[in-house]
Amino acid sequence: MNLEQQIRNAKLYYKKHHSIDEREFTNQVIEKLHTPSRTPSKSVFRYKTAIGVGISACALLLIGVTPVMATAIYHIPKDNFVSEWFHGLGQGTKLVESLNTPVTTHGITVTLTNVLYDNGGLNIGYTVTPGQSNFPYGGVVNERSLSFEVNGKPTELPWAGSNGKAGDGYTGLIQLMNVSQLPDSFDLKVTFHQIGKQKGDWAFSVPVSRSEANALTKTFTPSESHTYGSDTVTVEKVEVGPATTIMDFKVSSPQRDWGGQASQFWVVDDQGHPLRSEYGGPIGTPTITNGIQTGTFREVFISSPTTPKFLMVSAYGSGPSPLPAFQVPLVPAQ
Amino acid sequence: MNLDECLESWVHEYANRLTQIAFTYSRDWSAAEDITQETLVKAHKSAHQLTQPDNPFPWLVRIVINECKTAFRRTRWREVLTTVIPDRMVPSAEDVYVESTETKEVYEAVLLLPEKYRTPIVLHYFEDMGLHEIADVLEVNHSTIRTRLARARERLGKQLNRGAAYEPGTANPQCKTLL
């Protein structure tokens, strides 16, 4: 049998290993459609909804507006996307710096509106007018359409993007995730290389600093462990900053199918408010030694308005429901 | 057909296929279902952008791939885990042929291809999409897709210990049958 035929035969394997429960699936889609707020899900993969949906949801949840009002708000161009994303944290402070630097190329204007930089990430708000149609994300950016320079040096930085329609254009957020290796203050150059199908260069130079955020960040080292069957979860360090809360944790378990390992968390503060995960899940690397699989992970959440005295942490294993929660006290080091 | 009927029809017609595509990125069925659900939510909200209502599948595929890439960027560690422990499939005994070691090996070899080679293979061989359709979905030239398919087959051939027939830089005899 030749390779061509073998690949075609592999289709049978591809097709038969999973099928959805159509009714349940439809209900879940409808639920997501009508409930854009973030809720715990059975998935171990989490990611943000488009910013338009997210911001609308936040508006609904936080200020209690009616759906009609929310629709109206959704269409109003946002000028401080970053602090909206962070539920208003840092608004009116030096944490969220207003930029408003427009660049027009090929009749498309991109404006960087705000920036927030702390240990949890570097967040850049922007708008594009007019919007480009016929693209799932409004055509603002894709993975190849952005490049970065740090102090004049081209640097590959993993990023996530979200955007939504606003007015006659789009407004969005670029989030650089792994910022621990970056200097506390530097000149960042961001270049958009493509918007929709229009190629071009929209370049911006922005001085960024996390000194202010660092000064306001509290670090706790609870080293709190909890055991679920053969898995042990240890919350080693929690950094509570004005905008983001970073949780470093370790999971160890016997080597097995990683899908069953507890490595996703639902975190609630001492007031019962859930912390929203910034990047949809933890980032980290597992190692296997002598049959023991150990993962060291970091997850970034949006901070609570005030520093909590403790966090309640529920781990997710392979099932849809969280495992029993355990308390992680946030006690300042003596 | 109103939007809600559209949504039901998309779930009925395409949800399984979209989930299978998402799985080739996430290697996790639960995650793949979540991604497909988000895809359909986005599609529902952007239905006005659908230019071919009689054949929405390529448009939905484009959204699901974008969703997968977005999810992947945020969960880079998962690929590491998947590489460490690649054997997540547990074949049943229903169909000996389908479950044959060779079929499984080819499928898993496809999953191990880099994304730019894997996706064209999945869309072409598993989803029966044409080169132009794939090119539209991935927003690249159709000759790029042709090249990627050829290189993907080279890599698969090597991975399956058939490297001799597909030395880099030489014509791939399989291309003729495809193109």
Image (cartoon, rainbow, N blue to C red):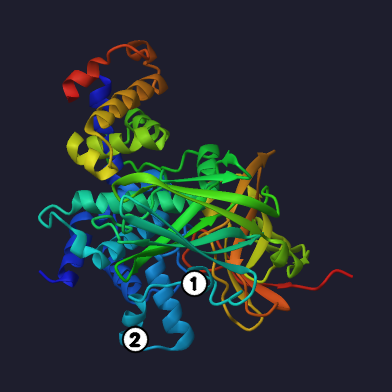
Question: Hey, what amino acid is under mark 2?
Answer: Met
Q: Are marks 1 and 2 in contact (CB under 8 Å)?
A: no
User: How dense is the environment of label 2, judged by Cα within 10 Å: few (below 14), some, or many (20 and up)?
Assistant: few
User: How dense is the environment of label 1, judged by Cα within 10 Å: few (below 14), some, or many (20 and up)?
Assistant: many
Report the disc number at residue A135: none
Residue A127 in the image, given as x and y percentages of width and height: 41, 63
Which image quadrant: the N terminus of chain B? Answer: bottom left
| Location of residue A2 (image quadrant) | top left
Chain at numbered mark 1: A
Say which residue label 2 marks. A69
3D distance between C-alphas at marks 1 and 2: 19 Å
Say which residue label 1 marks. A80
Task: Please determine whether, in this image, residue B138 is positioned above or below residue B35.
Answer: above
| Point 43% across, 89% down: residue | A64
Question: Hey, what amino acid is under mark 1?
Answer: Asn
Residue A88 in the image, given as x and y percentages of width and height: 55, 77
Task: Please determine whether, in this image, residue B153 is positioned above or below residue A333.
Answer: above
Which image quadrant: the C terminus of chain B? Answer: top left
